[in-house]
Image (cartoon, grey):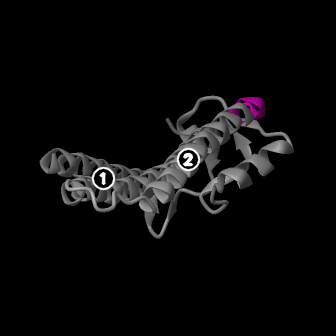
Amino acid sequence: LFCANASVRARLPEGAAAIASELQCDPGRFSLDTGCCEVEDLQAVLEQLGGSIQFGLRNLEDRQQFHSHMHQKSIGEHPCAFAADAMVSKRMELLAAAHEISTQMLNLIQISVSQLLCAACFSSADPGVGGRSFHEEAGALEASLAAEWRRLSLEVTSMFAGLREHD
């Protein structure tokens, strides 16, 4: 869904440039004075995105505090301490990996939504960059984002497989 393909484009009000800046729309790729979306709709999406990202960050902070708390615990001299430590240490290692992957996913959500909104709401500024058309550039960016989502998905799958294997 590209604004460049839309049959109706309108001159955007003053607030649109600030939103485009917040979205980090590349002014070399997108015309920030004409577009296809209402400024209020963009603001609503950005507020929802911001709330979702903050929710994720709060959960990550809670998980990090739990990780720090549990990392300091020890079973001591209990006869089963070796087995329990082995189980807990693997889970703590996976929790740290999950934290890193989750942080990367939150960042990728932000980037993906921003790029989708730029493409959907702002006209292309020029026909291409570096000899490639706007659609080729957009396709390359989408492929790059999709590859990153696949990579993170495989990391999560591998992490859960490791946990099942350990059990």
Residue occupying image coordinates x 17% and y 44% = 164
Q: Residue 26 has which mark?
A: none
Q: Which kind of residue does numbered mark 1 sit on?
A: Arg
Is 65 covered by the magenta stretch? Answer: no
Residue 150 relative to residue 130: left or right: left
Disc 2: CA contacts within 10 A as few (<14), some (14-19) or many (>=20): few
Of 68 and 146, which appears nearest the observer? 68
Mark pair 1, 2: CA separation:
16 Å
- Which element type, helix, strand or loop, lies under badge 2? helix
Q: Mark 1 = which residue?
A: 91
- Which element type, helix, strand or loop, lies under badge 1? helix
- Residue 100 visible? The answer is yes
Residue occupying image coordinates x 62% and y 39% = 49
Q: Residue 62 has which mark?
A: 2
Q: How many numbered dots are placed on residues in this image?
A: 2
Residue 19 relative to residue 14: left or right: left
- Of labels 1 and 2, earlier in sequence is 2
Disc 1: CA contacts within 10 A as few (<14), some (14-19) or many (>=20): some
Residue occupying image coordinates x 22% and y 58% = 86
Percent coordinates x, y for residue 165 in the rendering: 13, 49
Above or below residue 141? Residue 50 is above
Most frequent secondary structure within the magenta stretch: helix
Residue occupying image coordinates x 50% and y 47% = 112
Of 85 and 140, which appears nearest the observer? 85
Task: Please tell me in which quadrant of the rendered image residue 15 appears.
Answer: top right
Q: What stretch is highlighted in magenta?
A: 37-42
- Residue 107 visible? The answer is no
Is 39 covered by the magenta stretch? Answer: yes
Task: Please tell me in which quadrant of the rendered image residue 117 appears.
Answer: top right
Name the residue furthest bottom: 130
Residue 166 relative to residue 59: left or right: left
